[in-house]
């Protein structure tokens, strides 16, 4: 049987996690046949595709049963992050911008935003983390990055001078925060136009480079920042964090309706601090009622607070971390949800800057 015939067969497989055919998902890049051996090149749409083994098994089985003359099937995986070019409108080379929001403070929104960014980076993606929580910028502290970002100067081909801010580096994660600009104990009152201006600067004047994902830690509750973001970017979506209690849930519903109003797609809800104290399962139930995906839960665990306080959120992915599996599940679900939402959407044209 020829390579193209095997390709046709393999393309009919329904991807076990994305629930569409591999053909639809354009994941089979090439099939080569040499004697009784087939080599199949598969392109995964995100580094957070964690069910490779299951997919490989399906492909091998399908190829073998389609072609009786094939004895060996080799599957090669490559990864090309899919995205809707979230930043194209403003010249940002970022495939997917994901906002992390909550209805109120203290539910672990920054913890989830930082974990999501570190998790995607841990899996091999190019990631940035923007702390837009102007009321309580805690990302520098959690990620363990301090200092003043360098300002780079460029001259364009027309002789114009351009300044760009270099984000700080946390083990390969690019981090930008209002916390780098103000003293830790400085109280700042932000009004709408100022918020708009600082966010624009953070997005447009930061040297983000090419990113697969830019995670934004949003200020809790407010609509101003979401509106600005939705005007500037084609966001891949928003993740809403809440705790299992009823009160926090009501706030989360407000956060969802706010994202809906500014037309930012909601990727789903995360339950944080699940366990004996606050209960468990409340968020999954509410997510089902609201018909938004439930993205997973993080147990209440001292290690989360201790690592956050010590600037070591990234080490929650260490092999012996008690929350590693819960966090990876959330990273996987968020990234897959982004891919699902991309279905058949046209890409935005990339605007060139510099
Ligand atoms: P928010 O951004 O919503 O204000 P934070 O992420 O700053 O919330 O979290 C508030 C506090 O709760 C921090 O001290 C953080 O370390 C702690 N925390 C967050 N999630 C957990 C968890 N799952 N288990 C234990 N402590 C947590």
Image (cartoon, rainbow, N blue to C red):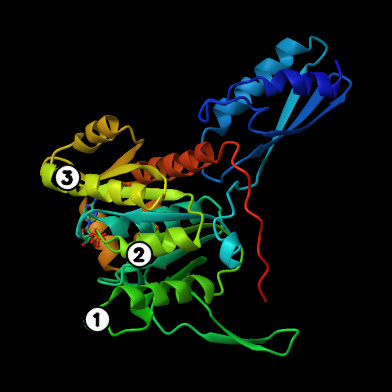
The residue where tag 1 is placed is 188
The residue where tag 3 is placed is 250
Image spot of residue 123 (x, y percent): 52, 50
Other-residue count near label 3 (Cα within 10 Å), few / some / many at <14 / 14–19 / ≥20 = some
Residue under the image location 69 percent in, 23 percent down: 11
Where residue 74 sits, quadrant-wise, is: top right
Image spot of residue 229 (x, y percent): 43, 62
Image spot of residue 94 (x, y percent): 57, 60
Of 153 and 272, nearer the camera is 153
Residue under the image location 13 percent in, 39 percent down: 279
Residue 225, disc: 2
Other-residue count near label 2 (Cα within 10 Å), few / some / many at <14 / 14–19 / ≥20 = many
Q: Is residue 338 left or right of residue 319?
A: right
Q: CA distance from mark 3 to mark 2?
A: 20 Å
Q: Give the mark nearer the N terminus: 3 vs 2.
A: 2
Q: CA distance from mark 3 to mark 1?
A: 28 Å
Of 276 and 149, nearer the camera is 149
Other-residue count near label 1 (Cα within 10 Å), few / some / many at <14 / 14–19 / ≥20 = few
Q: Secondary structure at mark 1?
A: loop
Q: Secondary structure at mark 2?
A: helix
Q: Is residue 327 left or right of residue 42?
A: left
Image spot of residue 167 (x, y percent): 49, 75
Q: In this picture, is 269 found above or below 120?
A: above
């Amino acid at each position: 049987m020829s390579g193209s015939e095997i390709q046709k067969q393999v393309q009919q497989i329904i991807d076990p996690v994305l629930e569409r055919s591999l053909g639809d998902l354009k994941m089979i890049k090439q099939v080569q046949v040499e004697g009784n051996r087939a080599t199949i090149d598969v392109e995964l749409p995100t580094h957070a595709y964690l069910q490779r083994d299951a997919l490989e098994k399906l492909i091998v089985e399908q190829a073998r049963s389609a072609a009786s003359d094939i004895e060996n099937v080799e599957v090669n995986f490559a990864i090309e992050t899919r995205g809707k070019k979230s930043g194209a409108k403003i010249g940002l080379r970022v495939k997917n911008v994901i906002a992390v929001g909550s209805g109120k403070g203290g539910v672990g929104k920054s913890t989830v935003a930082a974990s999501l960014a570190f998790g995607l980076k841990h899996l091999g993606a190019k990631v940035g983390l923007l702390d837009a929580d102007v009321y309580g910028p805690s990302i520098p502290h959690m990620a363990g990055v301090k200092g003043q970002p360098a300002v780079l100067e460029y001259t364009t081909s027309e002789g114009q001078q351009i300044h760009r801010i270099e984000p700080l580096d946390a083990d390969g994660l690019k981090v930008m925060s209002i916390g780098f600009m103000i003293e830790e104990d400085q109280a700042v009152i932000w009004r709408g136009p100022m918020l708009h201006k600082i966010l624009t600067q953070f997005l447009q004047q930061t040297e983000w480079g090419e990113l697969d994902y830019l995670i934004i830690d949003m200020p809790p509750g407010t609509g101003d920042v979401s509106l600005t973001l939705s005007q500037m970017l084609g966001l891949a979506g928003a993740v809403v964090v809440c705790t299992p209690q009823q009160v926090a849930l009501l706030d989360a519903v407000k956060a969802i309706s706010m994202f809906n109003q500014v037309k930012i797609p909601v990727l789903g809800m995360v339950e944080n601090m699940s366990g004996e104290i606050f209960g468990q399962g409340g968020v999954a139930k509410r997510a089902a009622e609201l018909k938004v995906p439930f993205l997973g839960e993080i147990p209440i665990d001292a290690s989360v607070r201790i690592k956050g306080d010590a600037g070591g959120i990234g080490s929650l992915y260490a092999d012996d971390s008690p929350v590693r599996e819960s966090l990876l599940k959330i990273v996987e679900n968020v990234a897959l949800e982004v891919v699902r939402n991309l279905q058949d959407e046209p890409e935005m044209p990339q605007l060139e800057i510099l």
